Image (cartoon, rainbow, N blue to C red):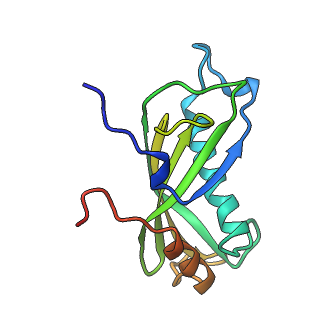
Amino acid sequence: MPRPRARRDAYHHFRRLDTRWADNDSYGHMNNVVHYAFFDTAVNLWLREVAGLAVPGGDVIGLVVETACSYHESLGWPEPVDTALAVLRVGRSSVTYAVALFRPGASEAAAEGRFTHVYVDARDRRPVPLPESLRRAAEAIAIPAPGAG
């Protein structure tokens, strides 16, 4: 029985990333660790370009506390990947992202994941309230969590 897949129209922020020959594993598809690298890249580019955080080198940094991925179909070089990003939850010092990878033009995700950052002071690694620019940017791309009323 096929699992339901996230659809492109559920996401708010997109970025096309190129795959590389080295991204493929010995089975001829993109290695699992590369999916996570694309998730991380999509979030960090958004933090720099939209949320206004200094990545790297800022006073506030995001530490990954949870991540997950569901794989629906194979991706790999030489085809590029469309990364898609939305926010599932905005907390006092954390953000949970929904991230998906799509073939260019596809309406259903080839892979979809969840990615939670806790934002901390870069020096002492203690949680801090979200910077206002991050909170506003996250709320702008927030979607209801699956199953939420």
Q: Residue at x 59, y 83 (%)?
A: 131
| Left or right for 81, reference 70 | right
| Left or right for 97, reference 40 | left
Quarter of the figure with residue 1: top left
Pick whichever, 111 or 26, lies toward us: 111
Quarter of the figure with residue 21: top right
Q: Residue at x 62, y 20 (%)?
A: 25
Q: Quadrant of the C terminus?
A: bottom left
Q: Give the total number of marks visible in the rendering.
A: 0
| Left or right for 82, reference 48 | left
| Left or right for 91, reference 13 | left
Pick whichever, 13 or 126, lies toward us: 13
x, y (%) of residue 129?
Answer: 51, 84
x, y (%) of residue 35?
Answer: 57, 38
**Does 48 appear above or below 108?**
below
x, y (%) of residue 5?
Answer: 38, 39
